[in-house]
Amino acid sequence: MTYTGEHIWAGQLGHGFVILSFVAALMATIGYYFSSKEQLTHSWKRFADIFFSLHSVAVLGIACTLFYMLFNHFYEYSYVWQHSNNSMPMQYILSCFWEGQEGSFLLWTFWNVVLGNILKRSLKYNQSWEAPVMLVFSLVQVFLASMLLGIYFGDYKLGSSPFLLLRENPEFSNLPFVQNANYLAKLDGRGLNPLLMNYWMVIHPPTLFLGFSSTLVPFAFAIAGLWRRDYTGWQKTALPWSFFSVAILGTGILMGGAWAYEALSFNGFWAWDPVENSSLVPWLVVVGAAHVMIVNKNKGGSLFTTHLLSVSSFLLVLYSTFLTRSGILGNTSVHAFTDLGMQGQLVIYVLTFIFLFVTLLIHDSLLKVSYIVLSLILCYFGILYGYKKVLFFTWIIVSTAATVWTYIKDFPKEKNEEELFSREFWMFIGALLLLLSSIVITYFTSIPVVNKLFNANRAPVKIADYNLWQIPFAIIIILLVAVTQFFKYKRTDTAQFYKNIRWSMVISVVAGLVCCIPLYFVKDYKTASTEDRVNYILYSLLFISAIFAILANADYWVRILKGKIRHAGASIAHIGFAMILLGALISTSKRQTISQNTSKKQVERLGENFNAQKSLVLTLGDTLPLGPYMVTYTGKKREGIDVYFHMDYLAKSKAGKLEKVFDLSPMIEDNPRMGKASNPDTKHFLGRDIYTHVTYADLSEPADVDKDAYKEPTNFVGHMHDTIPLDNSLVVIDSLLTNLSEQEYRQNDSLLIITAVLRALDIDGHVYKARPKYIVRKNMIDPQEAVIPELGLKFIFWKINPEQGSVEIQISEKVGNTKDFIVLEAYMFPFINVLWAGCIVMVIGTVIAIRERFRLRKISQA
Amino acid sequence: MKKIHVVGIIVIAVAIGVILTSLSNSTSYADFKEAMANPGTEYHVVGKLDKTIPVEYDPKVNADLCSFYMKDNNGEEKKVVLHKSVPQDFQKSEQLVLIGKMQNGEFHANDVLMKCPSKYNDGKPQI
């Protein structure tokens, strides 16, 4: 069949680029391999350079083709159809590009190409490293390019192509549209996930992926170093790159936090979500790696650690790709990418690079050969006979043993022991703590993997447990951040050291206690559980340490560095890091739920040990207290699929009158395809944020109805003093009065009148009374209704159940009584701006440090 | 022994400590039967919402309380009291994960994770 309107050339072009990028990366790898062996000639290097350039062009070509297809709505392509549509605002076309897995792999490949070319240029003066480093780069590119191939080998699919035609997508190939030659004429795309239509989603993924890519540079150097058995030569060159990675990856992670805080309703900026963790962990490790590199540069040593950490940060990026892309996380993550059947491929990549690391690390040639042979045998058995888990564990144990053995027997180590009072010792400890902290996070995050490996059924780790484990690490690390600069390399004069830090230490302890005691110990501590008490102590320690780190680093900058900004990169970055921790600590630990149910309505409590009330029911026009404010719900408005709920926040002015301070419009997106999604709205003040989101609301349009008609009556069964919640009031049965005693009634068979005295309390506290009567006349029951016109209520007292001692009252409410209402949660985040400011300060500091490194290198080269 | 080795041993000890502690005091996935046998212990229970029985939620009475019936993966059905407002699109959920404990024959959940049939991902090209 010939289909009309298809742009087959675009897909062919794109696919051509994909194959070219793969083949060229492969050729470049081979070329760089032989190039690093050649002594005098450069023919292999020229060969490899050409292919690396060709690879770069091909990757650019893939990206441009995909963009062209997205811009022009070529819905005949599966990727375009899945991730964009006609009604989508064009500024989010970038988000479409990386929404799917193929696109995000492409983004990663693209950044690797950019960094690879810059690195190649900067290594011009360092020729002996160029070929080995570019070899690693090209090899990684071979793997990444294969993720986009989408080629079948029998039943096994290698990669997933973004240039697959919609009608050739196996998911859709049996649908009726495939039979229609003119299907494109009416086809619209499925569209972008609305949660991604957010400005953060335009800049967060590329930054994060640049961060991921940048970990490849220290990895490539470390692998090249192992291969060449030159363990120190690369570190000076890789150092600024590692800090580049620290800055970019750190920014990317916090941008993700900002997106979560602004656009998602999980009530905070960090939820220890697996996807967040798996970008945090490589960052922690690369921070460790970069710091050990500084030690190595200034004093030598720490060789094994630099290699281990540099390799690990990249391996952890690969591992987190596996975690988030393989579908293994199931429903433990908000980010769930769908499984494209690349689980096996991703595992193979991670294992291949571990294999490469261990093989290159091993010195002893007999051990090396045995390791390679054993790995191949295990792999062979795994493929042929199964028992994959057992073989996998065997291999992991063998690899660890080989690594440890090589480290003990053959790896060059420092002869002299480090001084306790030396900078290198404590920097090393800091790096080790970062590694340990990331091992804990990785283990917690990998619970679904652990479950699969051991057939266990453990639930994901709770946020509170993450915090409990990570805060002690944070305390020690931030203390190290405070003091380590005051140590000197090799040996420090202890007296001078104490003299240098004593003032910042004293001030921070005093200031910390002055702040922490009212924050954690005055009100909350007495009533808190043991668990919370432990937390309060940990919070206070972290608070004091963070203040100490800020003061000590500022002091170092002003007094020791004489305020010179050029040298102050480290101090500034450390101040920023301490501010991030401080901001995160205060805003999270003192987060206040200001939306308790304050509507004066009776609240029935069921069960124990459950969180305090956190929802507020707000009826149209009502004004209720919300933390320090009064809040009014002024109405809702639908814009397309978004329903906005407008709220005014009021506060008493000086004259004692309620005045509007600001308004917020949290939104519920009523997406016909995605379902409903609640988007918070936040008012930012310098010292605190007021965060509100709607958890429950009626999204329908107000209908045209007679507001004065009574609704269907409801029957209420109750006792004296019971409270009946109604739409606009609370009704209490105050008393029941009779005109006769029971005896008189029995004797006389006369008229019995029982009056229910009802008291209605409206939202403003006005009291109304109603007296419906239950009248028995000659054994005939004839109830007399009572009305409260002001509240639009009608009561009929129609039954008495003497056995239960209860009465039954029919209540009718007017239609107009039921006003539109919403249920909302509101939180106050104090001092969250300290966190965002800290992020900016940290990035500025890191950039200053990187510039200084480059400047020093230029001077040394000149 | 070098200081570094002492540090190394501490690091390994902490790592093992973390794994052991987290093994001993972590919640696990369970069915209602197991949760019934250990009232007061927190579990994650996976199951499906019984859509034939209406979900009770009256924000005017308590905005942080709703109740419904869920069938666990063994087909056992229990009343669930969720101490939260009713989640968006609750009726459309195809799978629930409750986090909470059994109390007096009812499952009291602090939180619920739900999996919706994402029409977004399941959309098919139609003309």
Image (cartoon, coloured by chain):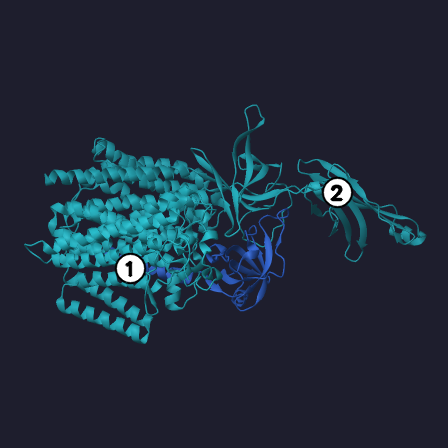
Q: Is residue A513 something one can see in this rendering?
A: yes
Residue type (three-letter) at the residue carrying disc 1: Ser
Q: Which quadrant is home to the N terminus of chain A?
A: bottom left
Q: Is residue A48 left or right of residue A348?
A: left
Q: Is residue A258 something one can see in this rendering?
A: no
Residue B25 location, x and y as percent?
A: 43, 60
Give the drawing colour for chain B.
blue
**Which disc number belongs to residue A146?**
1
Callout 2: residue from which chain? Answer: A
Which sits in the foreground, A262 or A296? Answer: A262
Residue A534 location, x and y as percent?
A: 42, 49
Q: Which chain is cyan?
A: A
* Nearest to N terminus: mark 2 or mark 1: 1
Which sits in the foreground, A414 or A727? Answer: A727
**Which disc number belongs to residue A709?**
2
Q: Is residue B72 left or right of residue A733?
A: left
Q: Is residue A18 left or right of residue A407?
A: right
| Residue drawn at (31%, 52%) of the image | A106
User: From what the image shows, is residue A650 above or below residue A5?
Assistant: above
Circle 1 Cα neighbour tier, 10 Å, few/some/many (<14 / 14–19 / ≥20): many
User: From what the image shows, is residue A185 above or below residue A856?
Assistant: below
Dot in front, 2 or 1: 1
Q: Is residue A100 left or right of residue A646?
A: left
Mark 1 falls on what kind of element? helix
**Total number of numbered discs in the rendering:** 2
How far is disc 2 from disc 1 in space, using C-alphas? 69 Å
Labels 2 and 1 touching (C-beta < 8 A): no
Residue type (three-letter) at the residue carrying disc 2: Ala
Callout 1: residue from which chain? Answer: A
